[in-house]
């Protein structure tokens, strides 16, 4: 292992500019991905906050016995997708309408008879707050004979789903694009190093060195560059995050940074980029030396 380390350090010394270029390319590639990742993390958190409003409201027929409503509430609460069921009687429904629809406050005050029905408000578990799950639960609730109508805002939940999918897709495409650029740069660096050491490699082969032994320093070189690039990308991402948060005038002090597992994944991704670029390039060019 010490021999591999010495060879890797020699590689850095032979071409410091190329090594610095490789590390910087990986760092800025991951940094760009990291910026979009931060947007995605905070967008996901914002969408999660919005998704708490995903509720199914089942309006009940007048005159439904309280015992029937209680039993039905227990049955619905037992659905695997359901987090909670709250019964809202006619008076509570009217009070809420008066508070939320202020423009109709006078009209509600002059009512002789409460026109609003009682309802069951069903909150879904976080993993089921999507259009398909909400629709499935709504269909089951519609099967109760005392349920007059069921509503859950299907259109805006579908828009929410589209936003989630779009954020994930854009992040994936950008990540792959910049990873490809970094792999190409690493490949060019390794190719130049291989050509620079062509005579040395030929001598090593003459004395019996295997291709695996020759590849070792190059692979370690690429992995190390990827590791350094990943660490540098994290520092850049943190600096950009803090700069944006401090200079923000919109009260975005609640912005989230990456969790430790995400940071570890970013570093591993950098190592994988460096190792992958080295593996592809050295395998191709050693055949020509």
Image: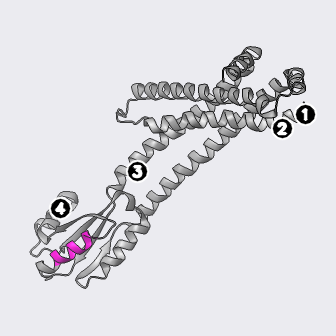
Q: Secondary structure at mark 3?
A: helix
Residue drawn at (33%, 67%), measured in percent from left and top?
80
When the figure is inspected, residue 63 is found, relative to residue 215, above or below; the finding is below
Which of label 2 and label 4 is nearer to you? 2
Residue 126 in view of the camera:
yes
| Distance between mark 3 and mark 4 Cα atoms | 25 Å
| Distance between mark 3 and mark 2 Cα atoms | 46 Å
Q: Where does label 4 land, which residue?
A: 96
Which of label 3 and label 1 is nearer to you? 1
| Label whose residue precedes the other's in the sequence (2 or 4) | 4
Q: Is label 1 in contact with label 2 (beta carbons under 8 Å)?
A: yes
Residue 221 falls left or right of residue 168: right
Q: Is label 2 in contact with label 4 (beta carbons under 8 Å)?
A: no
In the drawing, what numbered circle is on residue 47? 3
Q: Is label 3 in contact with label 2 (beta carbons under 8 Å)?
A: no
| Label whose residue precedes the other's in the sequence (3 or 2) | 3
| Distance between mark 1 and mark 4 Cα atoms | 78 Å
Q: Secondary structure at mark 2?
A: helix
Q: Where does label 2 land, which residue?
A: 284
When the figure is inspected, residue 114 is found, relative to residue 267, above or below; the finding is below
Q: Secondary structure at mark 1?
A: loop
The percent coordinates of residue 188 (x first, y second) are 79, 30
- Magenta-drawn segment: 69-78
């Amino acid at each position: 292992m010490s021999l591999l380390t010495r060879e890797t350090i020699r590689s850095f010394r032979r071409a410091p500019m190329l090594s610095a270029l490789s590390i910087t390319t990986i760092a800025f590639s991951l940094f760009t991905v990291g910026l979009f990742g931060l947007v995605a993390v905070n967008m996901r958190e914002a969408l999660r906050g919005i998704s708490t409003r995903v509720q199914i409201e089942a309006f009940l027929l007048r005159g439904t016995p309280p015992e029937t409503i209680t039993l039905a509430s227990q049955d619905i609460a037992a659905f695997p997708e359901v987090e909670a069921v709250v019964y809202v009687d006619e008076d509570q429904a009217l009070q809420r309408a008066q508070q939320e629809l202020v423009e109709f406050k006078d009209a509600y005050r002059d009512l002789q008879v409460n026109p609003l029905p009682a309802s069951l408000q069903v909150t879904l578990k976080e993993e089921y707050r999507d259009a398909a799950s909400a629709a499935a639960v709504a269909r089951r609730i519609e099967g109760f004979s005392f349920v007059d109508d069921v509503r859950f805002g299907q259109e805006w939940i579908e828009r929410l789903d589209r936003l989630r999918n779009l954020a994930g897709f854009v992040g994936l495409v950008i990540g792959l694009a910049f990873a490809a650029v970094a792999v190409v740069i690493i490949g060019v660096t390794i190719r130049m190093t291989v050509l620079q050491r062509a005579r040395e490699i030929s001598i090593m082969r003459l004395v019996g060195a295997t291709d695996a032994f020759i590849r070792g320093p190059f692979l370690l070189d690429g992995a190390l560059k990827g590791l350094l690039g990943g660490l540098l990308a994290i520092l850049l991402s943190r600096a950009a995050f803090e700069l944006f948060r401090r200079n923000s005038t919109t009260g975005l002090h609640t912005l989230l940074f990456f969790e430790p597992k995400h940071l570890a994944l970013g570093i591993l991704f950098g190592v994988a980029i460096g190792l992958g670029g080295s593996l592809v390039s050295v395998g191709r060019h050693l055949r020509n030396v």
